[in-house]
């Protein structure tokens, strides 16, 4: 005699099905974390509204609206690749930096941190504006082409000199690659998101824009307020002191081994 359990047994997933469900749930959760607070979240909500409207039109036996929306959805994948290109780049870069992939590759924090913290402290005390982009896994070559290549050993003295108002390169950004100042006077992309604080000027918008396009860590010194901020992964940590900056950079040096190389070794 067939029991009720036998009738619904086909609905119960096996261990492989449970494994797949857990993987998909984790991927969906990570996706939501990536788009949270970005323009992608607004677009995703808009897409959900369109999907709801499509099924509502189907339920009401409408003809024109479902036909037009079906044509729209056919090209939706290509449109999504174009619209969400910055978010996709950032997501793939973060996937490559996952702690699981870094577990067996640890190194001690480098002297790069001390040179940057020293320079930022000097610039802040002198109320000199600065923006320093630290390249990690995602290359910044496309932005490096907008500046002057230096390939000079990183030092606090050189960083301070570059951002001195009399320097011809002081308006642009410095790109740090390993233990070298790779480029000075670089032009970075401005964020398209609205910034809540109107005291955030062009340097802050450029720092936020680059952090949205790549995994770079961008340190900003405000010329108006002398405050120090750090942008990473599309988010800002503002009004930090030098010990906090050192802690952040030391943590990144451990998290991204092979990127920060000690000066002189």
Image: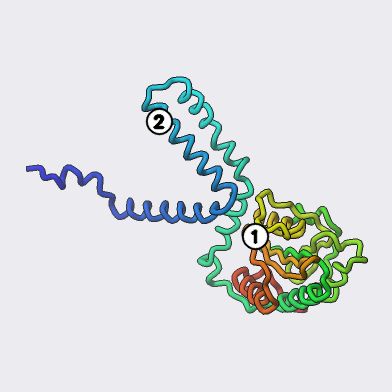
Q: Nearer the viewer, residue 61 or 210?
A: 61
**Local secondary structure at mark 1:** loop
Q: In which quarter of the image is residue 232?
A: bottom right
**Which residue is rendered at x = 63% and y = 79% of the image?**
108
Q: In which quarter of the image is residue 106?
A: bottom right
**Left or right: 230 in relation to 183:** left
In the image, is residue 2 above or below residue 92? above
In the image, is residue 52 above or below residue 169? above
**Left or right: 246 in relation to 63:** right
Q: Where is residue 45 in the image (x, y as percent from the top left)?
A: 50, 43
Read off the residue under disc 2: 56
**Which residue is rendered at x = 51% and y = 32% of the image?**
73
**Which residue is rendered at x = 66% and y = 67% of the image?**
238
Q: Would residue 176 be visible to someone looking at this image?
A: no
Read off the residue under disc 1: 215
Q: Where is residue 104 in the image (x, y as percent from the top left)?
A: 54, 72
Residue density around tag 2, few if under 14, some if 14–19, many if 20 or more, within 10 Å: few
Q: Distance between the residues labelled 2 and 1?
A: 41 Å
Furthest-top residue in this view: 63
**Left or right: 9 in relation to 215:** left
Q: Position of residue 43 (x, y in %)?
A: 55, 42
Residue density around tag 1, few if under 14, some if 14–19, many if 20 or more, within 10 Å: many
**Local secondary structure at mark 2:** helix
In the image, is residue 144 above or below residue 154? above
Task: Please report contact status of discs 2 and 1: CB closer than 8 Å, yes or no.
Answer: no
Quadrant (top left/top right/bottom left/bottom right) for the N terminus: top left
């Amino acid at each position: 005699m067939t029991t009720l359990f036998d009738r619904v047994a086909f609905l119960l997933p096996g261990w492989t099905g449970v494994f797949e469900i857990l993987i998909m749930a984790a991927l969906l959760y990570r996706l939501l974390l990536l788009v949270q607070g970005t323009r992608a979240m607004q677009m995703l909500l808009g897409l959900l509204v369109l999907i709801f409207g499509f099924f509502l039109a189907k339920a009401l036996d409408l003809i024109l609206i479902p036909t037009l929306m079906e044509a729209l959805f056919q090209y939706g994948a290509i449109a999504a690749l174009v619209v969400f290109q910055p978010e996709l780049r950032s997501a793939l870069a973060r996937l490559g930096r996952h702690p699981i992939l870094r577990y067996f590759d640890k190194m001690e924090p480098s002297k790069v941190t001390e040179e940057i913290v020293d320079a930022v402290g000097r610039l802040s005390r002198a109320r000199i504006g600065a923006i320093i982009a630290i390249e990690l896994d995602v290359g910044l070559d496309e932005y490096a082409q907008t500046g002057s290549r230096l390939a000079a050993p990183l030092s606090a003295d050189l960083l301070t000199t570059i951002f001195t108002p009399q320097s011809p390169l002081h308006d642009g950004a410095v790109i740090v690659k390993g233990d070298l100042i790779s480029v000075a006077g670089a032009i970075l992309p401005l964020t398209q998101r609205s910034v809540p604080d109107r005291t955030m000027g062009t340097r802050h918008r450029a720092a936020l824009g680059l952090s949205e396009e790549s995994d770079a860590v961008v340190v900003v010194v405000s010329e108006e307020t002398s405050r120090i901020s750090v942008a990473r992964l599309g988010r800002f940590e503002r009004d930090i002191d030098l010990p906090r900056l050192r802690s952040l950079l030391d943590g990144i040096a451990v998290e991204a081994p092979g990127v920060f190389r000690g000066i002189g070794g």
